[in-house]
Image: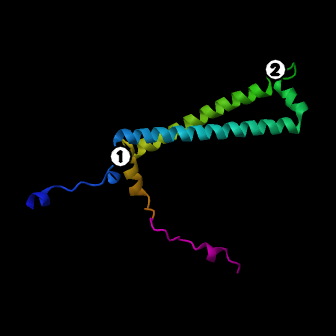
Amino acid sequence: MEAAESAPEESPPALEAPAPTDDRLFLLKGGIFLGSAAAAGMLAGFVTTLSLAKKKSPEWFNKGSMATAALPESGSSLALRALGWGSLYAWCGVGVISFAIWKALGVHSMKDFRNKMQSIFPTIPKNSASAVEWEEALKPK
């Protein structure tokens, strides 16, 4: 009887922490999903805007799509160049800001960053009670 009491209890497999490789695979799948969703949204927005511009004024759309003597660069190549430079500036700006915050906080890993943010910002309550009663806030006075 003592042997049975001294044996450590095993937890069910559902409660065990996932292996590090499972974590990385989950993050990779999540990153691929978010990246593909963002790319699909950007492509849909660009195509919708382009088709709307062509439908609104096809004459001006065709003038802007080819280079002429008056306009040495077509509108589409100018827009593509502007998009490229804007994207480069946006990526570099976010990278520089992220790096500056990372160094200013003095963290060395994402766990350190999470702990630092949790110590700076207040905790979010996990109860389901809303801080604002919407029925009270939206009812007519």
Secondary structure beneath dot 2 equals: loop
Magenta residues, start to end? 125-141
Looking at the picture, tell me which residue is in the foreground, 92 or 56. Answer: 56
Residue 92: mark in rendering:
none
Please name which of the two marks, 1 or 2, marks the residue nearer to the observer: 1
Q: Which of marks 1 and 2 is nearer the N terminus?
A: 1
Is 37 displayed left or right of 15 in the figure?
right
Residue 18: mark in rendering:
1
Kindly report the secondary structure that dominates the magenta region of the rendered protein: loop
Within-10-Å neighbours for mark 2: few <14, some 14–19, many 20+: few
In which quadrant of the rendered view does residue 67 lie?
Answer: top right
> Residue 26, percent across and down?
44, 42
The answer to whether residue 99 is seen in the rendering is no
Looking at the picture, tell me which residue is in the foreground, 85 or 14. Answer: 14
Quarter of the image with the N terminus is bottom left
> Residue 24, percent across and down?
41, 39
Q: Residue furthest top?
A: 69
Quarter of the image with the C terminus is bottom right
